[in-house]
Image (cartoon, helix red, strand yellow):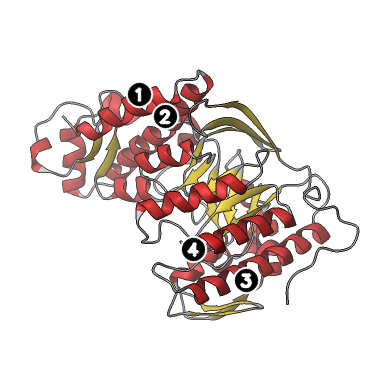
Amino acid sequence: MRWHRPAGNPRNNSTLNSMEFHVEKKDSRTDARAGVVVTERGRIETPVFMPVGTQGTVKTLSPRELVEIGAQVILANTYHLYLRPGHELVRELGGLHSFMSWPGPILTDSGGFQVFSLSDLRVVRKEGVVFRSHLDGSEHFISPELAIEIQRALDSDMVMVLDQCVGYPVDHPLARQSVENTLEWAGRCKSAWESSDPPGARALFGIVQGSTYEDLRKRCTQELVDIGFDGYAIGGLSVGEPKSATFEMTALSTGLLPEGRPRYLMGVGFPRDIIRAVSLGVDMFDCVMPTRNARNGTLFTSRGKLVVKNVEFAKDLRPIDEDCDCYTCRNFSRAYLRHLFQAGELLAPRLATLHSLRFFLRMMADMRRSILHGQFSEWSAEFLARYDAGPQ
């Protein structure tokens, strides 16, 4: 049954004034824009990359280190925190910010993508999703209403609706059904949000689905805008489809989304892809790739990826990236980091993660600056030429 807006709520204007977003400058040659998201817990300058702290921690780094390298907002995951330690415990202990000692804004994913990844352990129904825990096999049911309740218990600043993500390739009927469920659940999330949330508190994001089908993406985007949200995420991409399709669907969605709301492209993390998406009007990004790759010895630098475990760096006294200002690059050599990885020392993934995240956060700050100064295209060309040249 399709969700219907309750009588008396005006279309497109019923979102809470909980989060403000202002576009400060638009690029004259692309759709890139620099903006500011204002939340109760701080300002977020966009375009922005959000380090992923799935279980209430960005792996290997402390909150103080994240602040020092320029992180403005982090992402945590509803699915994982619901299973462990449990959202009610987090609520009892003062909410996620207090629990993990993070002072800035937090965005929580609803868990839809994690449930999608449990293809052998879940059943999707119109009412919600039944799934088995990857931890102990116990059975759970998450409805749109519970997804909102969990995120309210976590006290996150930006809350995502429950959505149904599908992989690639997928046939049109299944993709259409996922859009039907996503829209139904988005409406129920909005109703649950408005009935339980005091005015002025936090922000709710809708999520666009539709795989690589233009008609489904268009329908999903337009109906989400009709429901009305504080921000909009573009989901269901970077799941195996060709890059050309990723950006065709991104452009389709950004072209239909309102100018005055932040746009968040979920799970896209290669530097070239982020720059391309920013040129299409995307404001927010997250991805585990920089931290996951760093823990395995592959680091992002201004001259491309560098595999520091390689034997060629055994006697290399240069920093990971001579253009980087992070603690790792200011104090340690490639040879030392390689030694730490070879020896299995815990300091290795810490120093590597510190560098790779600083690289991403500095890239976003430089990109924003280029938009404000009307030099986005020039900056992009210069950055990518250097990045594609490869490590020296």
Find residue 375 and report its image quarter: top left
Where residue 192 appears, as percent x and y from the top left, is: 77, 63
Q: Nearer the viewer, residue 252 or 93?
A: 252
Comes first in the chain, label 1 or label 4: 4
Where residue 160 appears, as percent x and y from the top left, is: 62, 56
Q: Nearer the viewer, residue 315 or 205?
A: 205
User: Is residue 74 visible in the rendered structure shown here?
Assistant: yes
Give the residue pinned by disc 1: 325
Q: Marks 2 and 3: CB-CB under 8 Å?
A: no
Distance between mark 3 and mark 4 Cα atoms: 14 Å
Comes first in the chain, label 4 or label 2: 4
Distance between mark 1 and mark 4 Cα atoms: 43 Å
The amino acid type found where label 4 is placed reads: Tyr
Q: Marks 4 and 2: CB-CB under 8 Å?
A: no
Q: Quadrant of the C terminus?
A: top left
Residue found at x 61% / y 38%: 103
